[in-house]
Amino acid sequence: HIELPEEVVVNLTKMTDNLLKNPNTPSHGQHLAGVIHNEKYIYQQDFIDAGVNDMLEGCVRTYIHQSATLNGVPQDATVESQINSAWIVSQYENEYNPSHNHTGCEISGVLYLKVPDVKGRRKITSKEGKRDNDGDIVFPYMSESQREGEVLSKGMLQVAPTRGLMLIFPSWLIHQVYPFIGEGERR
C-alpha cells in the first residue's frame, strides 16, 4: 500500500472528473465484472497529461522489485513495466464488484480518489458491534479461519478505502468490493 501525495490525488481527481464528464470517453464497463453504471477507460496519455504517469509507473516498479527481491532475485536486477490498462470505477449506492481477478497483466492496483463516509449507515440491531463492510475491498485468498487464537492465517485481507490510498497486488489475486447505501461516490 502507498499513501499518494496530495498533489497526485488532486491531479488524478481532476483528470477523472474530466473523463467522466466527457461523453466521448469510452466505456470500459462491458469488459469488467462490476455491477457499476459508470466505468470509463483511461489512456496512458491521460496519466501523462495529468503529470502522474512516472510516479504511478515508479510505484509499480518498486512493488515488482521488492517482491522479486523477497523471492531471491538479485537486488541489481532490472525491472521494466508499463501500464497497459486502466479505468475509472465510479461507484454509487448499491453498486458493487463481485469476486474477480484481472487478466492480460501481471500486476494490478487500485487507488482511491473519492471515499464517502459510508460506515454506520445501515441500522441493523443484530449486527451492532460487528465489522461494517460497506464499501470495503476484500482479498479472499482462502477460507477464513474461525478458530479462536488463529495466528497462521487470517484467510483474507479486508481494507476500508481512504482517499489517497493505493493498493498494488498480483493480477491473479481474487478481490471484491462491497456495496454501500446512501449518498456519495466511491471513485
Image: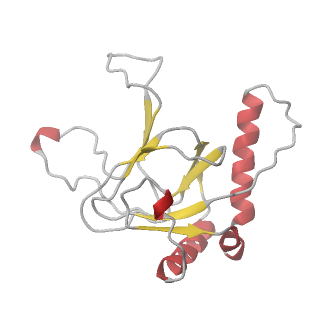
At horizontal 70% and vertical 76% (from top left) the residue drawn is 49
Residue at 38% from the left image edge and 62% from the top image edge: 36
Task: Tell me: 146 left or right of 170.
Answer: left
Residue 87: image location, x then y, percent:
55, 63
Give the quarter of the figure containing the C terminus. Answer: bottom left
Classify 40 as above or below 77. Answer: below
Please identify the quarter of the rendering in which residue 5 is found: bottom right
Q: How many marks?
A: 0
State the image coordinates of residue 109 (x, y, percent, origin top left): 58, 51
60 over 45 or under it: above or below: above
Q: How is the image coloured?
A: secondary structure
81 vs 38, left or right, is right
Q: Residue at x 39, y 25 (%)?
A: 143
The answer to which of 187 and 30 lies nearer the viewer is: 30
Q: Is 172 situated left or right of 77 in this image? A: left
Residue extending farthest to the front is 30
Please, is residue 143 above or below residue 20 in the view?
Answer: above
Q: Residue furthest right?
A: 76
Residue 105: image location, x then y, percent: 65, 47
Residue at (64, 49) in percent of width and height? 104
Q: Indicate left or right for 68 with 128 as reference.
A: right
Residue 171, percent from left and from top? 59, 43
Taking depth in this image into account, of 172 and 75 the one nearest to the observer is 172
